[in-house]
Amino acid sequence: MRFIINLVFIIAAWKWGDWRHWKAYYPTILFLITGDLLYNFLTYNFTLWQFRPVAFDQPIYSNHTLITLGIDFINFPATVLLFLGNYPKTRVKQAFYFLAWVSFSSAMEYFIHRASGLTYAHGWNFWYSATFNVILFSLLRIHHLRPLLACGISAVVVVFYSWFFHLPVSSMK
């Protein structure tokens, strides 16, 4: 399943991604990847969600770490190229576009969760993920326009989620 999802992201980015301006999106791609790697580092022993291989994923994506790396280095760059590269000009279109991306990402997670490719822990659930998608896509746009502001907001989000989900400092490596 993950292999197919990665392939779809690659094809979509190849076909509809804004490759002419990839250098403009590169910092935001790194921001997104770094944020996810930081989450996985900080919550290594206290994960809020964990990916699991489904169906024929086993040979390539046999564990959470390999699945995460596939997401980070295939899906995330494609997402940024598609999301920012096709961002509409008018406010009304931006609102619908934003909601479409949040809905798509949330629906994809719901499907993966229902297929047993994702489990939740320590109080996390689908609705927290859907809410986080709102934050995530907001931060991608903010980072593209004002990187330092996005980094500051991200720090606040990390502290809030750590507090809200009682991330024990003792669980960190």
Image: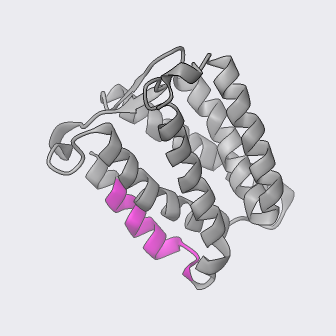
- In the rendered image, residue 50, in percent from the top left (x then y), is placed at 39, 30
Identify the residue at horizontal 50%, vertical 15% (top origin).
122
Residue 45 lies in the magenta stretch: no
| 80 shown above or below 39 | below
Identify the residue at horizontal 46%, vertical 36% (top origin).
109
Identify the residue at horizontal 52%, vertical 72% (top origin).
16
- Front position in the image: 160 or 21: 160
Of helix, strand and loop, which mostly describes the magenta segment?
helix
Toward which corner of the image does residue 82 lie, by quadrant? Answer: bottom right
- Front position in the image: 111 or 153: 153
Toward which corner of the image does residue 72 lie, by quadrant? Answer: bottom left
Q: Position of 79 compared to 160: left or right?
A: left
Residue 18 lies in the magenta stretch: yes
Q: Position of 108 compared to 6: left or right?
A: right
For residue 86, say whether it is visible.
no
Q: How many numbered badges does the structure rendering display?
A: 0
Identify the residue at horizontal 34%, vertical 43% (top origin).
65
- In the rendered image, residue 12, in percent from the top left (x then y), is placed at 44, 66
| 94 shown above or below 21 | above
- Front position in the image: 101 or 124: 124
| 90 shown above or below 23 | above
- In the rendered image, residue 52, in percent from the top left (x then y), is placed at 29, 33
For residue 154, say whether it is visible.
yes
Give the color scheme: rainbow, by chain, secondary structure or one colour. Answer: one colour
Toward which corner of the image does residue 132 lie, by quadrant? Answer: top right
State which region is magenta.
Answer: 6-19
Q: Residue furthest bottom?
A: 20
- In the rendered image, residue 49, in percent from the top left (x then y), is placed at 45, 28
